[in-house]
Amino acid sequence: MGDEIDRRIVRPLHLRHTYLQTSEAFRGRDAHGDVTPADTGAGYIDLSGRDDATWAGAAGAVVSTVDELARFTTALQAGRLLPPTLLTEMRATVPASTDQVVEHSSYGLGIMSFTTPCGTFWGHDGSIPGHSSRSFSDTAGRRSVEVFTPTESTDAVVAAADTLTDQALCAAAGRSPGRS
C-alpha cells in the first residue's frame, strides 16, 4: 500500500514529508498530540513518542505536513490525480451519519462534501488518538483550508473545528459566512 501511495501521489506531487507510517518511528519531526482531560479524567497526556498510528493503516497512518496535505487536496480536486470519470464517482455522495464526521457533510468514495454558507467544498477529516485534521478544497482545487488539532476530538473541539473550518473556507472563497 505504501508503494502505491508513493507511486500515485507522493512522487507526482513531489511530497517530501508524506508517507505511510509502517513502523512506530516517525521519519522526521512530528506534532505532539494530547489526550484531553475529558478523556483522562485528569490532565492532558502527551502522546509524543507513543502515538504509533500503524494500526490505522490507510485510515490514519498517512503522515504528512499541513502544506503537503493542502497540495494533495487541491491536486485531487483539480483533477491532477484521477481521470474526470473517477473524480465524478468519488463525488457521488450520500448523507453522512452524525457520529465521527464533520457536520453539514455528505460522504462519497473516500471524500466528503462540506456545505458552508459560502458554498460546497470537498475533502476529508480524520482523527487518531491525540490528533485531528481536516482538509477541504473548492471544487476546482484552487483554494484549500487545512485545520490540524493536536488533541482528541471531544465535542467541544469538534464544534470549534467546525466553526473554524466554516469561517476559513468562507474567507478562502472571499465571502462572508453570513451571505452565500
Image (cartoon, rainbow, N blue to C red):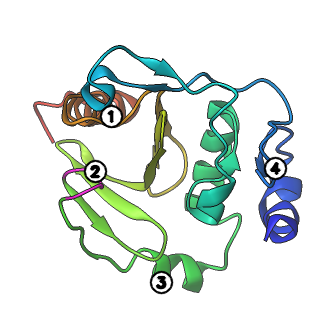
Q: Residue at x 30, y 21 (%)?
A: 37
The disc, 3 or 4, on the residue closer to the chain's N-terminal end is 4
Q: Which residue is mark 2?
A: 102
Q: Is residue 158 left or right of residue 110?
A: left
Q: Which residues are magenta?
A: 99-103
Relative vertical location of residue 41 with respect to residue 89 in this rendering, above or below: above
Say if 21 sits above or below 131 in the image.
below
Q: Residue 82, labelled with which disc? A: none
Q: Secondary structure at mark 4?
A: loop
Relative depth, front residue between 136 and 78:
136
Residue 119 percent location from the top left of the image: 26, 49
Closer to the eye: label 2 or 4: 4
Residue type pointed to by label 2: Val
Circle 4 residue: 23
CA gap, disc 1 and disc 4: 31 Å
The residue beneath circle 1 is 165
Q: Above or below — where is 98 with respect to 141? A: below
